[in-house]
Image (cartoon, rainbow, N blue to C red):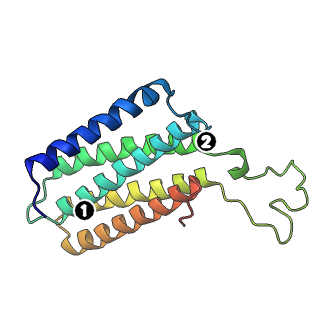
Amino acid sequence: MRISRTTTTALAACCSLALAVAGPALAADPAPERPAASVPAQDTADRLTTVGSLGDILSLGARIGKEAQAAKPDLAKLREMQRQLTEQASRLRASVKSHAQPSQQPQTSQQAPQPGQPGQPGAAVQRDVVADVQKVVDQLVKDLNQLLMDLAAANILGVAADVSKLLGDLQQLLGVVLSALGGGGA
């Protein structure tokens, strides 16, 4: 199809006419109202903080693994990344702790379990996700320390095993944090 100058002019005139007719109506109509959010803004901010910390930890863990397997790993750079990962792990712990809902906290022995709640036969046992995150983060930091010790000692076989453990810890951390956020996971 060939577009001529006449066709282009006619199309422009039609668009202008449509804008002239609909423009005032669109300008007078208030912005559509957003539906009420089902999740409070603070909860969303907490979740974003948790996801941000998790992303930073995963990124740092991947960078540490790559640097550790380099031909000449830079121990100073690895120690700096270790410091950053430890800081992010502290932020993640705090974020998960602040985000954990009362329903995710275990019942104390002083409380009598109610029918259909955790502690009753047939009821699903609630896990303490804060403790789960703490456990995985502690293991991640422990395995990272072992990796750096093996690098300093030039233990090549140990480094390979340590990087595998580090990867497993990162995957487990992802699953536990997703579970804490209510997204399934581990």
The residue type indicated by label 1 comes to Gly
State the residue at coordinates (79%, 49%): 108
Q: CA distance from mark 1 to mark 2?
A: 37 Å
Query: Who comes first in sequence, dot 1 or dot 2?
Result: 2
The image quarter in which residue 17 lies: top left
The amino acid type of the residue labelled 2 equals Val
Foreground pick, 169 / 75:
169
Secondary element at image label 1: helix
Q: Which residue is mark 2?
A: 39
Q: Secondary structure at mark 2?
A: loop
Instruction: Give the number of marks.
Output: 2
Relative image position of residue 155 (x, y in whole percent): 20, 69
**Image-based side of 141 in relation to 93, left or right:** left
Q: Please state the horizontal and vertical placement of residue 176, each as a whole percent of the image.
A: 52, 60
Location of mark 1 (residue): 65
Q: Nearer the viewer, mark 1 or mark 2?
A: 2
Identify which residue, 103 or 154, lies in the foreground: 103
Left or right: residue 95 versus residue 9 is right
Which quadrant, please, contains the N terminus? bottom left
In the depicted structure, whether residue 16 falls above or below residue 149: above
Q: Quadrant of the C terminus?
A: bottom right
How many other residues sit within 10 Å of disc 2, few (<14), some (14-19) or many (≥20)? few
